[in-house]
Amino acid sequence: MKILLINPPDDLEALLGEGASFISTFEPLGLLYMASFLAREGYPVEVIDAYAERLSLEALKERIIQASPDLVGLTSFTSNGAIVYELGKWTKRSLPDALVVLGNVHADVYAAQYLQNGCCDVVIHGEGEHSLLEVVRTLERGTRDFSAIAHASSMRNGDLVPNRDWGITPDLSSLPLPARDLVRQDLYNIPAISNLPYSGKGGKGKHMFTSRGCPNRCTFCVVHHGRRQRFNAVDRVVDEMALLVEKYGAGYIFIMDSLFISDKRRVTEICREIRNRGLSFKWGCEAHVRFIDRELVEAMQSAGCYDMAFGIESGVQRLLDGVKKKIRLDQVESAVRTVKRFSDIKVSGLFILGLPGETYQDSLQTIAFAKSLPLDMAQFSILTPYPGSEIFFDLRDKGLIDTGVRPDGTLDTSVWLRYSAYISYTDNEPIWVTPELTADQLKRLQKKAVRQFYWRPKQFWDQFKRVRVSELPSIIKAFVKTFF
């Protein structure tokens, strides 16, 4: 059986405009985990990262025809959901004997529409390794009845079988490391100017996961889906770090976990093991203000931690409470200042403008709060009710958001281009704006926030030092669009 897993193209120019130049390109680890899992079970797998290769849709179609797969797996995000929709329908027409399988959060939300409109044969819900293996084995038995697979929706005799239980892997150590060798490693790095403090100088930038799931329930987030947090063992985590450094030339590793520092003892043990092995690399992570103290910060710096990012979201406590953030502004200030006082670790603040109930003055207060903190970088996104988040379902159920689903069950996938947190870089309109603000105000506020934060001597100079001469023209163009 020939299995082809695809990370589809992504129309970032339409979604982000000049903002696309700030996005780092990382391996599609979700697909690579599934590829290594299937390979261990004896199934040969090919992976095409059409996004990283910058393949046109036509070029990708040629690659699919050449591969002549028995199963095509596509990962679907909101940003590439329209492309997946058309690509899936084309694949079913062009390779009628091939099974088309979709996965990831966007496919989970739109499973019925994808299936009923002939885009795919199966949609996998949740973490896909075990469910995809069940699909492969079912197909291998010569049947296309997937109704017994708990975490996979499908069609049977023209009817939808919505098996929407969210699948998880309880024991992450049961999974092999992602099959990074199946994709071209020269495609992945961090640009000089990006949404990460690391500038790409001093070795390749890589990324990895050390856990899955998140116990928090922020209403704007699509990550948790009721999933408890599960952790890889310390030795396995550092084994993967060593592999990235020694085999793939990583000078920097970003840990993608939603809540990496939630277990202080575990993080401290990881840092100790990095030191004991004599590994030399920089790394960064998503952090959380509730778990920061001096001892943890010093342990992280001693093991090479270069940066951490805090999801601060707002400078208005009422708005934080409204999205179930479960942090206080005094915790934010204490955490940021603790990191800066006891280490050289660079700190980024992640903010959201346009939270439900946010007024213009609230937005200005968030901008002022960001400037009051000793942050090295700040990101200001526009609230986007991404499909899969609590806010999305609430607005959908109240009829306050255009989901793209039409009364006859068809899809207008062009709507999904408006689901963008950086829509001010484009001529598109936000998919939803809190009634207290207008779309124009929100787009202007985003640029105002970036301008006021970075148009200060230290912040501007710190960013300018990262620039390579060869990248200067494109960076100037992006900066003009960002500030004005």
Image (cartoon, helix red, strand yellow):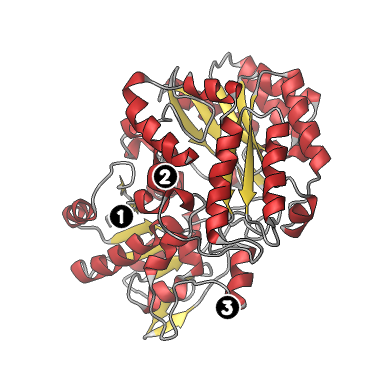
The one nearer the camera, 10 or 247, is 10
Q: Is residue 113 above or below residue 158?
A: above
Residue occupying image coordinates x 47% and y 53%: 423
Residue that carries the numbered disc 3 in the rendered image: 399
Tell me where residue 338 sits by quadrant: top right
Nearest-to-viewer mark from 3 and 1: 3
Q: Which residue is mark 1?
A: 3
Mark carried by residue 28: 2
Residue 58 vs 434, above or below: the answer is above
Residue 333 falls in image quadrant:
top right
Q: N-terminal of the two: label 2 or label 1?
A: 1
Q: CA distance from mark 2 to mark 1?
A: 16 Å
**Can residue 401 be seen in the rendering of this structure?**
yes
Front in this rendered view, residue 211 or 214? 214
Does the residue at mark 3 contact the one at mark 1 (Cβ under 8 Å)?
no
Q: Residue at x 81, y 38 (%)?
A: 331
Could you classify mark 3 by the number of other residues whose Cα lies within 10 Å: few (under 14), some (14-19), or many (20 or more)? few
**Label whose residue precedes the other's in the sequence (3 or 1):** 1
Q: Secondary structure at mark 2?
A: loop
Please indicate whether residue 186 sits to the left or right of residue 238 in the image: left
Q: Residue 383 at x, y = what percent?
A: 59, 55
For label 1, the crowd category at 10 Å Cα-Cα, with few meaning under 14, some 14 to 19 and many 20 or more, is: many
Report the mark closest to the observer, 2 or 1.
Answer: 2
Instruction: State left or right for residue 343 relative to residue 294.
Output: left
Q: Amino acid at mark 2?
A: Pro
Q: Position of residue 4 (x, y in %)?
A: 30, 53
What type is the residue that disc 3 sits on? Gly
462 relative position to 358: left or right: left
